[in-house]
Image (cartoon, rainbow, N blue to C red):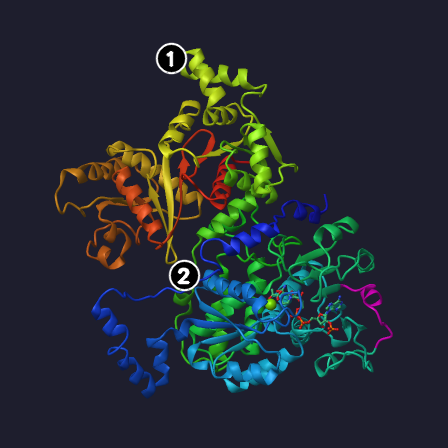
Amino acid sequence: MPANDKAARTRASVTEQEALDFHSEGRPGKLEINPTKPMATQRDLSLAYSPGVAVPVKAIAADPATAYDYTTRGNMVAVISNGTAILGLGNLGALASKPVMEGKSVLFKRFADVDSIDLEVDTENVDEFINCVRFLGPSFGGINLEDIKAPECFIIESRLRELMDIPVFHDDQHGTAIIAAAGLINALELTGRDLKTTKLVCNGAGAAAIACVELIKAMGFNQDNIILCDTKGVIYQGRTEGMNQWKSAHAVKTTKRTLEEAMKGADVVFGLSQKGAFTEEMIRSMADKPIIFAMANPDPEITPEEVARIRDDAIMATGRSDYPNQVNNVLGFPYIFRGALDVRASQINDAMKIAAVHALANLAREDVPDDVAAAYQGNRPRFGAQYIIPVPFDPRLISAIPVAVAEAAMESGVARKNITNLAAYAAELSARRDPIAATTQGIYERVRRFPKRVVFAEAEEEQVMRAAISFCHQGLGTAILLGRDDVIRATAEKAGIDLDRPGIEIVNARLSNRVEAYIDHLYARLQRQGFLYRDVQRLIHNDRNHFAATMVAVGDADAMVTGTTRNYATALADVSRCIDAKPGHKVIGVSIVIARGRTIFVADTAVHDMPNAEDLADIAVEAARVAKRMGYEPRIAMLAYSTFGQPIGERSERVREAVKILDHRRVDFEYDGEMAADVALNPHRMEQYPFCRLSGTANVLVMPAIHSASISTRMLQELGASTVIGPLLVGLDKSVQITSMGAKDSDIVNMAAIAAYNAGT
Ligand SMILES: NC(=O)C1=CN([C@@H]2O[C@H](COP(=O)(O)OP(=O)(O)OC[C@H]3O[C@@H](n4cnc5c(N)ncnc54)[C@H](OP(=O)(O)O)[C@@H]3O)[C@@H](O)[C@H]2O)C=CC1
Ligand SMILES: CC(=O)C(=O)O
Ligand SMILES: [Mg+2]
């Protein structure tokens, strides 16, 4: 099978409705602002506002550099656009650009812990735009210009760079150029080409294209070997139509006039133009082992599927996240600014850009270590045609790129702060990045490669139906909708959901020809537990959890998801009648709490009401397995209200006993206790117990009982202080997940994906 066919198979997608729902759900948009200091008392108010605030005001007036100490400036970037070149959609105006700019702001935070705000400036006039931005310097540590069309963007960026003493970086130019150059270096290496003799065509001669061509020329590409094209065709010397000084600088002497002619025999083609700009004929006419970077967003100049139809020797990249080799500036801007901010750079210069290129290119050539493989679940990538550049979820990016950028800034004299210990800086950076997103992303990727049959037990519910459709649409497998056919169809019609698509099966428990087999199977399990044959008949006929769980038990489905209409304990009791614990395992619930860049596993949040010491030790073992599977080295705190014997209390005894049991079992993970939650999570509190065996703050909390586990995780979730995933049901012999009652469709899809993932390969 050609490599690109495989790429196409693993591709996920979203519907237009999903995209709109995602943006409108809950608080509209994608970001909000949270205070970092308490604002609860009169004293807080006096410190944060008048009179306390006057003190830092005077300090900054006396020494402007202290703004980095007393305000958000040092970690704050503005994403600024006028909407004249929104992705590849063209000039749709400042307001329409807001979703993209909010998106970039969120990516700054998500990938590099840079705080960011989007600003949409409603003018196409260059001077007005510059005047609007130039006075914003005191607010920000950097300015990320975005989606401003050429040639205005060139003037805007260069004038603002002169006027402002903080980095001004037009991401579509330099961000794109850095990523494309890194991918190109690797693709040239893989195809055995020499930079100096390679022939490249760049379609598009705007912001991104001009910057890409300039950067690769600066890196040694022969300028006579690069042909630039725009809507009028080849940019040749002497052309007058549709020209500007930036295009002229790259005009070549050639008789070629069209993109078709230019692409004949070309080694590399960059698409920085528009959807569909490349034809199959053009791709067919390229040299052997062509390198095709179709970078237009959201839709590339040609898709990997189209290329795969005509040739199997291409190295193919796009700007999208749902194909392999994503050449997109998301791999750059968060980390480049991270490095620049951390040394308080006055600008992002060429040395810093080139350092980023090499850091990125080198990363793709390195072996992927175990803890990083989670980001690429099940398919540890190897440097090659399908992996020329790391994925945005690669957790190494946060330490590799900012360090290289910061170092280059210091060496080239634009840093206003020195970092002396770069190794310590790299470690700090890694700690800023939370691996859970890489893990969840990895779960989806893995399921896409090994799609599963998942039964949705409560498919008459509209949100379950939506989740099932999304599950299929994302290429995660077949969704089996369990319920009455007529009810499901009526609900679907009313909700405007189209069920007639591949990958959706409706199963009516009453009409299924598997009913007898399921009854026999379940009766064999339950006959000595007080169930008559007719009791089991009733369970299979009338109860969808029993039907679905038995489907999974006998292998008619790989996994099951339920829980939206029944409470957790009831659903778990239903499932437990049909499926046992995996031999040697304990069935427990593990919740994943993500708060302020930390991921904490909490167990048992679902099954054991009042665990005894043995149970607690088992729960620790099971929770450690989950943490390891998700790419974490577990450090388990056995929690209680007391810490190492103080205050003495009968309720902590079980926990102390559990620690002793773990000592006897000689388990292969770190654990200690009993301890209170603040000792487990706060390094200063933990320091007060120098004998504590944990090498750092805990990342797994084993709760003394279900009530404390459930109360604390739910409180965290409802107070909005953290994201809580789960409880995930672990330890069962077959894969089942139970959502919370009334779960939203997006939560149900996540649970279904996790269930499919746990069903194995
Ligand atoms: N993957 C990534 O990370 C990034 C991708 N991009 C993509 O690059 C594209 C251009 O963005 P940007 O440079 O910011 O926009 P600009 O508006 O600055 O430039 C667009 C350029 O594309 C040319 N063009 C448009 N349609 C065609 C076509 N059918 N054939 C040939 N040339 C064409 C225009 O030609 P003319 O000059 O004649 O008008 C112009 O030169 C977009 O699709 C964008 O999504 C941009 C940044 C990052
Ligand atoms: C990715 C990006 O910045 C663009 O397409 O404009
Ligand atoms: Mg852009």
Q: Position of residue 541 (x, y in %)?
A: 49, 20
- What type is the residue that disc 2 sits on? Arg
Asked which quadrant contains residue 97, the reply is: bottom right
Label 2's element? helix
In the displayed structure image, the side of residue 389 where residue 284 appears, left or right: right
Q: Which of the two residues, 43 or 110, is positioned nearer the viewer here?
A: 43
Q: Residue at x 53, y 75 (%)?
A: 352
Q: Is mark 2 within 8 Å of ligand 2?
A: no
Q: Quadrant of the N terminus?
A: top right
Callout count = 2
Question: Which stretch appears magenta?
Answer: 254-267
Query: Does the magenta run of residues contain 223?
Result: no
Q: Whereabouts is ligand 3, in terms of quadrant?
A: bottom right
| Image: 748 above or below 329 | above
Q: Which mark is residue 503?
A: none
Q: Residue at x 40, y 38 (%)?
A: 741
| Image: 331 above or below 529 | below
Q: Which mark is residue 432?
A: 2
- What type is the residue that disc 1 sits on? Arg
Q: Which residue is mark 1?
A: 528
Asked which quadrant contains residue 359, the reply is: bottom right
Q: Position of residue 149 (x, y in %)?
A: 65, 74
Q: Quadrant of the C terminus?
A: top right
Q: Nearer the viewer, mark 1 or mark 2?
A: 1
